[in-house]
Structures are given as structure tokens and as C-alpha cells.
Image (cartoon, grey):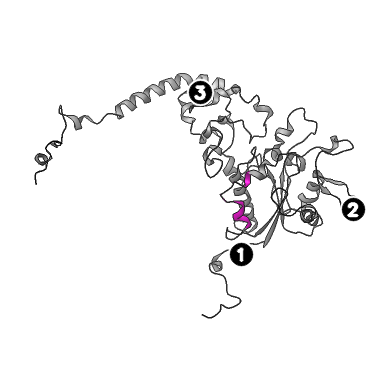
């Protein structure tokens, strides 16, 4: 067989879109006030998986290079060189992902709250806020991963000494990247793995020229992921409608009486599940504590108490639910019986006699 021409197009490539950008680096800072839970979470993604993106399994995307301290092979200076190069403007096309809340270093006195690497000239730690200052304006896009990075999260609770905040509070809610993208918030404690990877995929497709501007809500969350409430996608929602509430864990009934905030929290976990469509807080009996909301956790505590609004709504729905339950029970009982025309005689039979089958079906 003759060798293929040197400039022959690989099979299938002739119909694929050539991305506007050949390569994109993902500079992922895990040095905010955080637990690295969001990084760990995305390793469970499957739609798409991080491996799909890194190995080029999705057609039409630029080649991606991930620099995440938790997942990287490189360590020390070998790892940090990419961040220093980007800060100097030597890496033109990169996305900045921030994990963890951003501390207010004006409150840190002579020390610092969070840092990442050291300055090669002074040997001093480089603050996380300094990295954000150096990189955000040069990035094609800026993504906040997890509730700590989006809105401050657990570390931003009342009384915290760090004064920490979300990325949009630090950079400004009207910040735009050099490619004209607003900050993109993907909240969750931790972030739902496929929610983050699907958002990253959208941004990469947009940079490749395959998608329009990413649609975000007022809190800078992707609309298609956070447009519904937990309640609207919950398997237990029908029990709420029927005012059938549980007062203890382990029941399959509605959980609002034991602390679930699902009716007012924007999150798609009941529909999407957690890993490969399986799991998700209310799906496995856990209450929704509103971890995707900007008010988390202060406005949703104490977590195990019935939400104030639930007391009113559950009381109002009780007489309606009682009526609906009984009407449905009545209808169910009628549907559980065969139509009368099938039994218009005392005994319905085909003539089959188990003891004498030849009489019913003679040969």
C-alpha cells in the first residue's frame, strides 16, 4: 500500500471546525481560602470529563493545558513557571480559574492570609490577591469554581477575621476579560463536577468560535444550569404538593420540615445527580442547605431547622394537600379495578380446564 501524502488530512478532520485559537492554558489557582474540594470534585465529571478535554476528545476545541497544583505532575519551580510566564505576558491565551474565597489582605497586618509560590527576586511569598491582580486582566476569561470563590462561602461567614469575599466582589461585578467575557461563577460546595466541566466546555467552544456569548444570570451563573430550583427538579416535590412531609430522616417524603431549602434554591443537582447521574442531596435523603446561593451559609443557618418560609407555605398547603391526597386515593382505587364490561357475568373464563386441557383445545 502506498504511503499517504505528507500533507494528507487525518480521517474525519476535513469536516471539523478549525478553532480560532490553537492552544489554551488553564491557570487554576487553588490558593484561595478553600479545601481543594472543587478540584477533587471535577475529577468525577463525565459530561465531559477532564480527560476528554485534555486529550482532545471533543472535536473543534483548542488544545488545552491544565496547570492545577492538586492535579499537576510538576512541582516547585517547574509548576510555577507557567504562572510567572503568564504574568509577564509570555502566555497569550489562557483562562484563569480561581478556587477558594479571596481574603482581604488589608486586614492581614504584617503577614498575609493566603499566598502561592515565591517571588524569584525577593524570595517572599506572592499573595493570592497579587496573582489575581497580575493575571485577571491578561486572561481570555475568568472562572470562579465553587461557592467560596463565587460568593465567599463558609470562609465569608459573619465574624471571620480575613474579610474574605468572592471573586466578583474582589474584581468588581462588571469586570470583563480581555476577550470581553464577564466573570463566570459556578457555585456549589463543592461544585457539581459536570456543571463546572460543561461551563468550561462552553467557554472553550466560545473561544473556538463555535458558540455565542455565554448566557449568565444576575449572579453571573450559567443560566441553563441554575435557572431552576431544587424543588422543581426534586423527586420529592409531589409529596410537598400533597402536604405529605416527613419529620425524620430516612423517609422518602418531602424534607422541608427538617430543614430543606429546596423550594427557593437555584440548583440542578436533583436532576443531574452527582456522579454519572447518581446521587444529589435530596435524592439520597439529604436536605438542601442552599450551597449554590450568594447568601450561603449565613442566611440558611441553622441547617437542621425548618426554614421560616416553609412554616407558612406548608401550613397553607395542608388543607389543599389533604383534599388532593384523598381525591387521588379515590381515583387510584377506581383505576385499580378492571372495567365492568370485562366482568358482566358471575365468572369470567376462557373455557380452559387445567385438569382436562384437551376439552378446551381439542386436537
Task: Identify the disc placed on residue 333.
Answer: none
Looking at marks 1 and 2 on the same chain, the residue that comes earlier in the sequence is marked by: 1
Q: Secondary structure at mark 2?
A: loop
Q: Secondary structure at mark 1?
A: loop
> Is 131 contained in the magenta span?
no
Residue 72 placement (x, y as % from top left): 71, 52
In the image, residue 340 sits, relative to residue 136, either above or below, namely above
- Read off the residue under disc 2: 121
Residues at marks 2 and 3, CA–CA distance in whole angstroms: 62 Å
Q: How many marks?
A: 3
Looking at marks 1 and 3 on the same chain, the residue that comes earlier in the sequence is marked by: 1
Residue for point 46% across, 29% down? 238
Residue for point 81% across, 50% down? 134
Residues at marks 1 and 3, CA–CA distance in whole angstroms: 55 Å
Depth check, front residue: 339 or 258: 258
Q: Secondary structure at mark 3?
A: loop
Residue 239 placement (x, y as % from top left): 47, 27
Inspect this view and state whether residue 302 appears.
yes
Q: Residues within 10 Å of mark 3 (few under 14, many from 20)?
A: some
In the image, residue 342 sits, relative to residue 272, either above or below, namely above
- Read off the residue under disc 3: 246
Q: Residues within 10 Å of mark 2 (few under 14, many from 20)?
A: few
Looking at marks 2 and 3 on the same chain, the residue that comes earlier in the sequence is marked by: 2
- Read off the residue under disc 1: 18
Inspect this view and state whether residue 212 appears.
no
Residues at marks 1 and 2, CA–CA distance in whole angstroms: 41 Å
In the image, residue 326 sits, relative to residue 173, either above or below, namely above
Indicate which label's residue lies in the foreground, 1 or 2.
2
Query: In the image, which residues are magenta?
Result: 41-54
Amino acid at each position: 500500500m502506498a504511503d499517504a501524502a505528507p500533507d494528507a488530512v487525518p480521517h474525519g478532520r476535513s469536516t471539523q471546525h478549525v478553532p480560532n485559537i490553537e492552544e489554551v492554558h488553564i491557570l487554576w489557582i487553588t490558593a484561595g481560602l478553600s479545601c481543594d474540594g472543587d478540584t477533587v470534585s471535577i475529577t468525577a465529571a463525565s459530561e465531559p470529563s477532564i480527560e476528554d478535554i485534555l486529550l482532545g476528545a471533543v472535536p473543534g476545541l483548542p488544545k488545552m493545558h491544565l496547570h492545577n497544583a492538586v492535579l499537576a505532575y510538576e512541582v516547585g519551580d517547574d509548576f510555577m513557571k507557567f504562572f510567572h510566564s503568564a504574568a509577564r505576558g509570555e502566555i497569550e491565551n489562557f483562562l484563569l480559574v480561581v478556587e477558594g474565597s479571596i481574603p482581604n489582605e488589608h486586614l492581614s497586618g504584617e503577614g498575609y492570609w493566603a499566598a502561592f509560590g515565591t517571588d524569584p527576586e525577593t524570595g517572599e511569598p506572592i499573595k493570592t490577591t497579587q496573582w489575581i491582580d497580575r493575571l485577571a486582566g491578561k486572561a481570555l476569561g475568568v472562572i470562579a469554581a465553587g461557592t467560596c470563590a463565587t460568593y465567599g462561602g463558609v470562609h465569608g461567614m459573619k465574624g471571620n477575621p480575613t474579610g474574605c469575599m468572592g471573586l466578583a466582589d474582589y474584581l468588581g461585578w462588571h469586570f470583563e476579560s480581555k476577550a470581553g467575557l464577564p466573570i463566570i461563577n459556578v457555585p456549589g460546595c463543592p461544585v457539581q463536577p459536570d456543571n463546572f466541566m460543561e461551563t468550561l466546555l462552553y467557554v472553550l467552544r466560545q473561544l473556538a468560535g463555535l458558540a455565542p456569548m455565554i448566557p449568565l444570570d444576575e449572579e453571573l451563573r450559567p443560566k441553563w444550569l441554575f435557572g431552576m430550583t431544587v424543588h422543581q427538579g426534586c423527586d420529592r416535590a409531589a409529596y410537598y404538593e400533597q402536604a405529605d412531609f416527613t419529620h425524620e430522616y430516612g423517609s422518602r417524603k418531602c424534607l422541608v420540615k427538617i430543614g430543606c431549602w429546596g423550594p427557593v434554591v437555584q440548583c440542578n443537582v436533583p436532576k443531574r445527580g452527582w456522579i454519572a447521574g447518581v446521587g444529589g442531596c435530596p435524592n439520597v435523603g439529604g436536605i438542601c442547605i442552599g450551597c449554590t446561593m450568594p447568601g450561603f451559609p449565613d442566611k440558611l443557618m441553622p441547617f437542621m431547622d425548618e426554614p421560616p418560609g416553609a412554616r407558612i407555605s406548608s401550613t397553607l398547603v395542608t388543607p389543599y394537600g389533604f383534599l388532593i391526597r384523598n381525591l387521588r386515593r379515590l381515583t387510584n382505587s377506581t383505576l385499580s379495578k378492571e372495567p365492568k364490561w370485562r366482568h358482566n357475568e358471575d365468572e369470567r373464563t376462557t373455557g380452559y380446564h387445567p385438569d382436562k386441557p384437551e376439552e378446551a383445545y381439542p386436537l
